[in-house]
Amino acid sequence: MLTESDTTSPPGTAAAPVRRRGAAYAWRRRLHSTWVALLAWAAALVFFFPVAWMFVSGFKREADASTDPPAFVFTPTLDQFEAILGRDFTPFLLNSLMASIGSTILVIVLATPAAYALSLAPVGRWRDSLFFFISTRFMPPAAIILPLYIIANNVGVLDNATMLSLVYTAMNLPIAVWMIRSFLLEVPTAVLEAAKVDGAGFFTEVRKIILPMIAPGLAATALICFIFAWNEFFFAVSLTSTRAATVPVFLTGFITSEGLFLARLSAAATMAAFPVILAGWIAQKWLVRGLTLGAVK
Amino acid sequence: MTATESPVAARERRGPGAPKKEPKLPVGERWKRRGPLLPALLLVIVLTQLPFAATVYYSFQDRNLLRPDEAGFAGFANYGAVLGDAQFRGAVFNTVFLTATVVLLSMILGIALAVLLDQKFLGRSIVRTLLITPFLAMPAAAALIWKHAMLNPVYGVLNWALSPFGVDRVDWVSEHPMFSLVLMLVWQWTPFMMLIVLAGLQSQNPELLEAARIDGAGPGAIFVRITFPQLRRFIELAVLLGSIFIVQTFDPIYLITQGGPGQATTNLPYFIYQRTFRAFEVGEAAAAGVVVVAGTIVIAMFALRVFASMFREEAR
């Protein structure tokens, strides 16, 4: 008690030391922010290095890629990219595009009405449905892969890009429903009320008011679903083999190192990873909403 | 609740203090509202819930895909076989170890980076963009780059970076397989933790922080007394979601270590994959799958509770 009353100064005098500290304080803050900048930049370069290295090594000749110490200066070449494209990479790329774009379109088409039914015109027990969606996202793929494989095999859709995009749709629907719902809830109530007063029917309301307002949100949701589908490996490697195999499955050809192949691997990995890295950079403002299924904005 | 009240207004009134009962709608209207929800619900049920029900069924069957005619009811024999299997117990241990280590380390790094990014400095948005990239890079591509370009004993960048410190040509993947996986996964998951913690930091009320500063609270006191309690929910959410997803780790194990050497880095998803697609032991693989789900449900219960608490706040 005693020490506390000693250190607390009366309200009138409190401002004075703060003002006196002014110049020194500002200088300390500037030094502090220099340190913050240095640390943050150092961390960023360390974390980004493997990706940058992958990108750079793709432009090397094999002899430049596997050197000790690593070569930072070299003559760039496009040989590796040409070799990868010549090595039947295109079918894998097309399968990946079909599975991810197909599933993303389907996800948006299915999730938007579902999110509407869980927000603006809520069904009974809408909370249970929302939590049901989220709990399906927690299902470990390993626990359902066997029946999916057996069913797909019996129906004859094993190694089929449509089957894969359906699986990705189910995988991404919970994220999309939660995200789109969070965007729908941001549509101002007054705007919807006004539309009703003006006699707008349901479809006019959706087409002229709701969709334009949530369009950026839908784009963000689509980008995030595309990222997850494009990067997915477990279902792809389990459910496809020759006809519908996607880009990550193509990369399994690089598991064991036989001779000099690092530059070629880097070129393949660059082509595999860059579309999604770009999509993620574009969508980064909404990334956290997607990662937390809309719980954090 | 009157009949003229719009659904939107009704929704906004629903909060902790609001009446619990939903508005009673006529049957036709209720089905009209359910309509838009059903296709999505149906697809998710058909592709996740029914297969899981089938997994539970298979887990009680004695079945091998190579001998399809010999299937029969097995009771709890598969569970007995799996739980008595040292390889399975090893996989459980590896899963828990890998998940706990990666979550803990990436959370510590994530908090540190989020605190840095929460301050103003030159190029902050570029730094943020660079830092999230590991999470965006295709895990399969990243795993192979780590294996061959970073961790290679002869021309790997890690050995080169460590050579000034007297570390000599370590073959990381074969000598320290678990460490290699942890390293790659921490690299991959730190941005995830960082983004969620950063969102938490930026949701703080700046006036409150300013008031605390004027009252003479130092940065340490502000962090312990104000920032951390507010961050707790975000950290919990990141830890729980991270755990659920990291338990499912498959790509780097398949691509970097193949679960080896021996079974040293086999986790549950890889164990199930091998039992299913290498040994075709349907019953045992299914039983292992059910065990994984049981474990996941425990984490998911906590996760859902955090979601529900965020949800209540949003509805307020």
Image: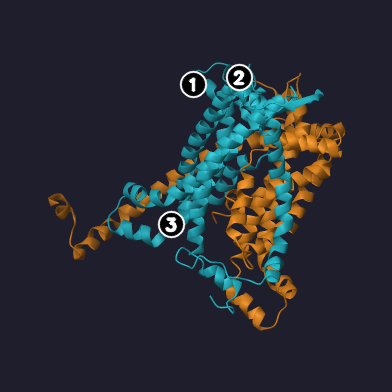
Chain colours: A orange, B cyan
Could you say where residue A14 lies in the image, as x and y percent from the top left? 22, 61
Q: SS class of the residue under badge 2?
A: loop
Could you say where residue A183 lies in the image, as x and y percent from the top left? 62, 62
Q: Nearer the viewer, residue A183 or B297?
A: B297
Pointer 2: what residue? B85
Could you say where residue B196 lies in the image, as x and y percent from the top left? 52, 48
**Which chain is disc 3 placed on?**
B
Nearest to N terminus: mark 3 or mark 2: 2
**Which one is in front in this view, the residue at disc 3 or the one at disc 2?**
2
At x 47%, y 57%, the residue is B203
**Which chain is disc 2 placed on?**
B
The three-letter amino acid code for the residue at tag 2 is Asp
In this view, the residue farthest toward the bottom is A198
Q: Is residue B265 above or below residue B12?
A: above
Q: Is residue B222 visible?
A: yes
Q: Is residue A287 left or right of residue B306?
A: right
Q: Calculate the distance from the C-alpha at mark 3 to the C-alpha at mark 2.
A: 50 Å
Asked whether disc 1 touches disc 3, contact meaning CB atoms under 8 Å apart, the reply is no
At x 51%, y 66%, the residue is B14
In this view, the residue farthest toward the left is A2
Nearest to N terminus: mark 2 or mark 1: 2
| Pointer 1 local density, CA inside 10 Å: few below 14, some 14–19, many at least 20 | few
Q: Is residue A126 above or below residue B166?
A: below
The three-letter amino acid code for the residue at tag 1 is Phe
Pointer 3: what residue? B204
**Which one is in front in this view, the residue at disc 2 or the one at disc 1?**
2
At x 72%, y 62%, the residue is B36
Q: Are marks 2 and 1 on the same chain?
A: yes
Pointer 1: what residue? B165
Q: SS class of the residue under badge 3?
A: loop
Q: Are marks 1 and 3 on the same chain?
A: yes
